[in-house]
Image (cartoon, rainbow, N blue to C red):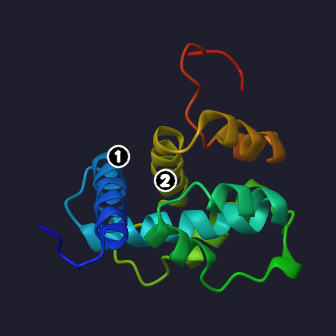
Amino acid sequence: MSQTGLEVFDKTFHKTNEWLQDVMEELHTDDRKYAYRVLRASLHALRDRITVAEAADLGAQLPMLIRGFYYEGWKPGATPTGDDLQEFLERIQSGMEDQPGVPDPRRWAQASFAVLARHVDPGEIEDVIGILPEEIRTLWPEPAGTEGGAR
C-alpha cells in the first residue's frame, strides 16, 4: 500500500531511508537526524568542490529526495571552490556547527563517501574522485580489489 499515493514519492522515501540507514551504520549511531545532517554537510562540501558539470552528473544519480537537499543553497557560479583538505573538512564542520560533541569532519566525510560509493554508479564515483586533489581523495574508500594500493 502506498504511503503517499504516488509511487515515485514512496520510492524516493524508501531509497533515502536506505541511504540514511547506511550512514547510521557507518557512524555507529541510531540517530537519524545526525546521519541526515552528516550526509547533507558532506554532499554540500563535495558538490562545491567539483566542477558544475560533474556536480550535475552526480546529482542525477541521487534519489530524488537526497537530490533536493544536495542542490539546496547551491551557487554554481561560486564553484568549484578549490578547497584543500583542511578547508574541505572545515566546510563540512561548518554544516554541523551546532552538533554537540567533538567535531569529526574526516569521519563524517568518510562515512558519507562510503555510502555514495555503495549506491552511485562506480564510473561516476571515479569521475568525481578524479577531479579531487589527492589529499581529498584519501577520504574515499578504496575501490574493490585495490586494498592497500594507492588511489
Taking depth in this image into account, of 119 and 139 the one nearest to the observer is 119
Coordinates of residue 72 in the picture (x, y in percent): 60, 83
Question: Taking 109 as reference, is 138 above or below it?
Answer: above
Figure quadrant of residue 8 = bottom left
Quadrant the C terminus occupies: top right
Within 10 angstroms of label 1, few (less than 14), some, or many (20 or more) residues? some
Residues marked 2 and 1 touching at CB (< 8 Å)? yes
Coordinates of residue 108 in the picture (x, y in percent): 48, 57
Residue 72 relative to residue 150: left or right: left
Q: Which residue is mark 1?
A: 26
Q: Residue at x 54, y 48 (%)?
A: 113
Q: Residue at x 62, y 70 (%)?
A: 44
Taking depth in this image into account, of 31 and 74 the one nearest to the observer is 74
Q: Disc 2 on helix, strand or loop?
A: helix
Q: Residue at x 58, y 72 (%)?
A: 70
Disc 2 marks a residue whose amino acid type is Ser
Disc 1 marks a residue whose amino acid type is Glu
Residue 95 relative to residue 128: left or right: left
Coordinates of residue 32 in the picture (x, y in percent): 26, 68
Question: Taking 95 as reference, is 124 above or below it?
Answer: above
Q: Disc 1 on helix, strand or loop?
A: helix
Quadrant the N terminus occupies: bottom left
Q: Which residue is mark 2?
A: 112
Figure quadrant of residue 52 = bottom right
Taking depth in this image into account, of 9 and 61 the one nearest to the observer is 9
